[in-house]
Amino acid sequence: MKKLFYTLLFNSLFVNLFAQNIPQGYQAKGIVPIGYTDMNGKPAFKMSIKEHKGRWYLFTGQFWQSGWSVLDVTDPAKAEVVKFIEGPPNTWTLQMELHGDIMITSLEKIFPNFGGNSEPFTEGVYIWDISDPINPKRLGHYQTGGNGTHRNFYNGGNYMHLAAGMPGYKGNIYVIVDISDPKNPVEVSRWWVPGQKETETEHHYITEKHPDEKATVSNHPHHVFCGSDHEVSLHGPPYVEGNLAFLPYGAAGLIILDISDIKKPKQVSRLDFSPPFHDRFGVHGALPILEKGVAFINSEDVSYGKGALSHASIVDIKDIENPKLISLFPQPLTENGRSYREKEGWSGPHNFNHLLHNPDVQPQGDLFYMTWFNAGLRVYDVSDVNVPKEIGYFLPANPARRFGRMPEDELVVQTEDVLVDRRGYIYITDKNMGIFILKME
């Protein structure tokens, strides 16, 4: 009994010694903070997670530094950065995706308002072996020849699905790449919205095969107007379920493709959101739950609350050829009942817990986790998909230090990404802070 007491006392002292203090001043309902790490001054953006031999490793892409971090979050109260991998100079390394022992990481040109310039950068996708999570080994590099890739999808197997800035196109398009030989990735096919290809004179799409095969041209089943470069662009990730790819395609809406023939993607259907909602990133993310017959959709508003309304929505996809909007998530409100659109920083929804192909991520149940920039993390009960209800939130205090140019106005909370592991721990990132680790009460 005495031995147990001293063991517990030692463990408590050890945690208190190495755990970082959770920044105070947060607001919360139904959620408690468990841990925090300042990431050694390297704010993170996207995240994924992997359990390996009983230990839990969180992988992150960095926001203001080129590179990726690996954190040991086995004990969430004392999360620790155990590895930083330097990325190529002048390059955005925002996102990583992993499944099993393979990880892919995006590389792209930095947007001008985030500090991008005319200096050389590295683009495309790095492919990694993470069988030793602390020491990833680079296996290959796929290059687009253009601006690189933004948010990509990989759920195991031979193919990665990219939102890629290819030369000769306006905005990002959908590209499927074979990585069965990671050292020699090969493009299999590509698909885009009519008007994105700079040389197009009529409305059609072309499926381009391997370089040694001829391209095929088919009539496009739907007319889609392609506006400015920023309006019609595949934000990604393209979310693949079975033989279907769900594309969050900006002002072109939600586009569903049949990829049963991986070399010939075919459009199945499309659902418009812009108008009435804003069009720059009118559809930013898409998460299909086929067994429930629904997809969760959201936009991203970068207008500082000055543009048309953003949205987070639920779509009925039981009839895949005729998707229908069935509900909208309620907009979060401040403590005095005001809209966050009136506050500083970007407002509106941004990301949700969507890496469901990863067995170490919590499956989608009755709770839905979504970040709302200056409104922090919001949690919803979606047991009735027709009436989603907010049941909890966590809003950190404003950052104490600015690491980058965004937000362009006051330095305020900008909660970026959320991931929930299968233990129930919730991880959120911020443009100018580290990672908060939370749990539902």
Image: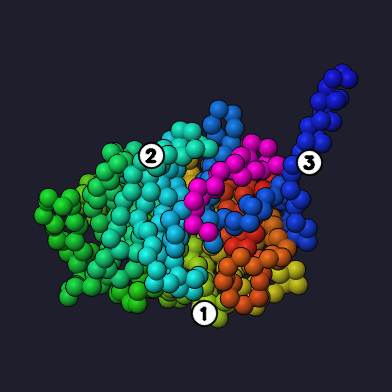
Q: Which residue is mark 3?
A: 17
**What's the residue at 46%, 39% (across, down)?**
136
* Dot 3: element: helix
- Left or right: residue 223 versus residue 370 is left
Q: Is residue 76 magenta?
A: yes
Indicate the secondary structure of the residue bearing disc 1: loop
The N terminus lies in which quarter of the figure?
top right
The 10 Å Cα crowd at callout 1, few under 14, some 14 to 19, many 20 or more, is some
Give the image location of residue 70, x and y in percent: 55, 44
Q: Which numbered tag is attached to residue 156?
A: 2
Is the residue under label 3 in contact with that under label 2 (CB below 8 Å)?
A: no
Location of residue 407 (image quadrant): bottom right
- Circle 2 residues within 10 Å: few <14, some 14–19, many ≥20: some
Disc marking residue 307: 1
User: Mark 2 falls on what kind of element?
Assistant: loop
Q: Residue at x 43, y 72 (%)?
A: 117
Give the extent of the magenta segment.
65-86
In-image side of 27 versus 332 (left or right): right
